[in-house]
């Protein structure tokens, strides 16, 4: 049952292709943010618990845009995991593999994508039945070349690289069929949200969607695999 729910969410993330990573200071900005993301074609957000507004922003997005896939990011503690799920988050993401937190979330049946950067971390996630992990910080840790090497021994593990990904390099990640989706903040930068520049967010989101379509439509590995 848990795995069915988890797989359903992962399928949605895979279809969308890019998960906008949001840092939001004021929950009252959430409706216009959600509108820009949905209009732009990415009905998805990972709202990070780096600000006090995170839980409320998740609740607002869920209420205003019920079809949106809203998750919580930078989840570091069981308390934040509870807050995120109570607010309506569909999934949780952590930057690292915090075994205590991961075991808590699995015990609560919370869909969780933990960050892994080493073979040992991947194996700990696998031991717990997970087959999809975040790879963070993607660019600084070695980028797509590193992921390809890391993926080789783990034939059924998929990655959600995040960190340093942008319109100029996202295609090289998406072209690898073991990349489920990429996370990134480039279309929803905090300064754009704070400045109320939702038109720019909409435009950058549209451009991101075009990159996914272009890459997945022509990606030889993806169509072959
Ligand atoms: C994350 O929270 O996963 C990253 O900080 C997002 O990385 P980016 O801001 O480089 O896209």
Image (cartoon, rainbow, N blue to C red):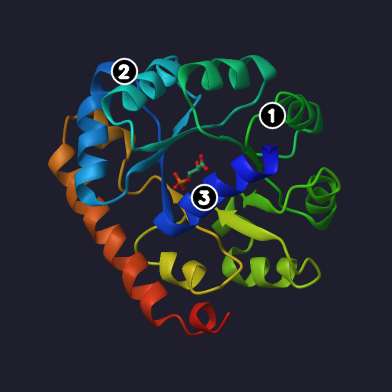
Task: Please give the name of the residue rendered at 57% of the width and 72% of the height, measured from the top-left corner.
Answer: 177
Give how far apart the Cα atoms at labels 3 and 1 are: 27 Å
> Label 3: few (<14), some or many (≥20) within 10 Å?
many
Numbered tag placed on residue 139 in the rendering: none
Q: Earlier in the sequence, mark 3 or mark 1?
A: 1
- Give the mark toward the camera: 1 or 2: 1
Q: Which of marks 3 and 2 is nearer the N terminus?
A: 2
Q: Position of residue 101 (x, y in %)?
A: 74, 27
Placement of the N terminus among the 4 image quadrants: top right
Residue 83: name its quadrant: top right
Task: Please give the name of the residue rendered at 66% of the width and 72% of the height, measured from the top-left corner.
Answer: 148
**Circle 1 residue:** 109
Q: Number of callouts in the render?
A: 3
Mark 1 close to ligand 1, CB under 8 Å: no
Mark 3 close to ligand 1, CB under 8 Å: yes
Q: Position of residue 158 (x, y in %)?
A: 65, 60
Give how far apart the Cα atoms at labels 1 and 2 are: 27 Å
Q: Position of residue 123 (x, y in %)?
A: 84, 52
Q: What element carries label 3?
A: loop
Q: Is mark 1 on a helix, strand or loop?
A: loop
Q: Position of residue 25 (x, y in %)?
A: 34, 20
**Circle 2 residue:** 27
Placement of the C terminus among the 4 image quadrants: bottom right
Residue 56: name its quadrant: top left
Residue 172 higher or lower than 207, as above or below: below
Compared across the picture, whether 59 is left or right of 37 comes to right
Give how far apart the Cα atoms at labels 3 and 2 are: 24 Å
Q: Is mark 2 on a helix, strand or loop?
A: helix
Q: Earlier in the sequence, mark 1 or mark 2?
A: 2
Residue 64 higher or lower than 134, as above or below: above
**Circle 3 residue:** 163
């Amino acid at each position: 049952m848990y795995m069915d729910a988890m797989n359903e969410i992962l399928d949605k993330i895979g279809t969308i292709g890019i998960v906008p990573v949001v840092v939001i200071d004021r929950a009252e900005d959430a409706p216009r943010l959600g509108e820009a993301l949905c209009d732009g074609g990415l009905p998805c957000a990972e709202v990070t618990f780096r600000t006090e507004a995170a839980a409320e922003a998740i609740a607002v997005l869920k209420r205003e845009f019920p079809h949106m896939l809203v998750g919580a990011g930078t989840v570091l503690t069981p308390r934040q995991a509870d807050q995120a799920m109570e607010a309506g988050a569909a999934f949780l993401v952590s930057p690292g593999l915090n075994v205590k937190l991961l075991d808590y979330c699995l015990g609560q049946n919370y869909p969780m994508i933990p960050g892994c950067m080493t073979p040992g971390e991947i194996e700990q996630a696998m031991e717990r039945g997970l087959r999809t992990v975040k790879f963070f910080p993607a660019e600084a840790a070695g980028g797509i070349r590193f992921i390809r090497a890391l993926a080789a021994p783990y034939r059924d593990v998929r990655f959600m690289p995040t960190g340093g990904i942008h319109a100029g390099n996202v295609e090289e990640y998406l072209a690898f069929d073991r990349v489920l989706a990429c996370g990134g903040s480039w279309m929803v930068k905090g300064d754009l949200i704070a400045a109320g520049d939702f038109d720019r967010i909409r435009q950058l989101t549209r451009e991101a969607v075009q990159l996914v379509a272009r890459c997945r439509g022509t990606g030889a590995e993806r169509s072959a695999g």
